[in-house]
Each structure stands twice: as structure tokens, then as C-alpha cells.
Amino acid sequence: MSDRELLELAAKAAGLETGHPMNAERLALDPPVDSLLVMRFGELVSTAWNPLKDDGHALRLASHLGLNIEWFINQQFVMVRRGEIGENIGWVDDALRHGALRKAITVVAAEIGRAMP
């Protein structure tokens, strides 16, 4: 699954709307913009929503979805889950630890979004 698909499904899980025409325009740019313009109930939430890169977006996503986060520092991985849906992401350098958490949150959120009608 591409990062763009992850973002769109994660946004769906969070109740965010991604159908704004600007998102299609951004995707057509070279290089494509790696964030989404998202709305909720017709109100602008963010013009650059990307929980894969933004700690605040990832934390709000995890909080909104009630995700469980468990760190395994010695084994260098983080587990994020909700119910039967879960993801483990590892890192090789402590500087990459936050990125692993953002990725795991976004992947779990995307799986929740995929399961929604």
C-alpha cells in the first residue's frame, strides 16, 4: 500500500474528508505533495495532514481511535493495536523511533479505515 493510500484510509478512520479537489491536484504535481487537505463536516482541519511525518497528527489520530501503544525498547520495536488490528514497527537507530511510531499508528488507522463501509 502506498503512503497516499495509507493517509486516505487513516483519514477515513478518523472521520476526515479527503475529497477536496486540491488533493487530486497535489497528487499530479512532480513530485507529488505528500500530505492531504482534510476537512470534517465541511470545515477545514488541515491543509497539510500527514501523520506519517507529523507527530501531532499521529498522536491525535491515535487518541481519536483509542489505539494502544506499547514500547519494546530493548528489542527496538513499537506495537500499536486496537482489538484484533495491530502493527509492529522496528527501528535500527534511536533517531528513527518516532518515525516507527508514526508509521505504526498510520498503518493501524488505515486498516481500521479499510474495514469501514
Image (spheres, rainbow, N blue to C red):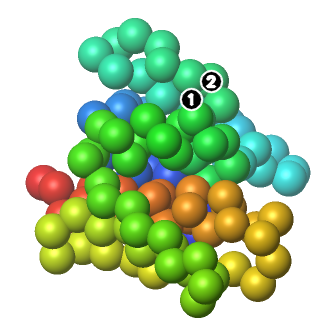
- What residue would you read off at disc 1? 37
- On the image, the x and y values in percent for residue 99 come to 68, 61
Helix, strand or loop status at disc 2: strand
Up/down of 58 relative to 17, above or below: below
Q: CA distance from mark 1 to mark 2?
A: 4 Å
- On the image, the x and y values in percent for residue 108 come to 36, 65
Residue at screen point 61% across, 85% down: 74
Residue lying farthest bottom? 75
Up/down of 76 relative to 5, above or below: below
Q: Is residue 93 left or right of residue 112?
A: right
Amino acid type, residue under disc 2 in the picture: Thr
Up/down of 36 relative to 38, above or below: below
Residue at screen point 62% across, 68% down: 100
Residue lying farthest top? 43
Residue 97 seen in render: yes
Amino acid type, residue under disc 1 in the picture: Leu
Residue at screen point 69% across, 49% down: 53
Packing grade of label 1 (10 A; few <14, some 14-19, many >=20) is: many
Helix, strand or loop status at disc 1: strand
Residue at screen point 30% across, 68% down: 81
Up/down of 88 relative to 47, above or below: below
| 89 or 22, nearer to the observer | 89
Q: Are the two marked residues, 1 and 2, in contact with CB atoms closer than 8 angstroms? A: yes
- What residue would you read off at disc 2? 47
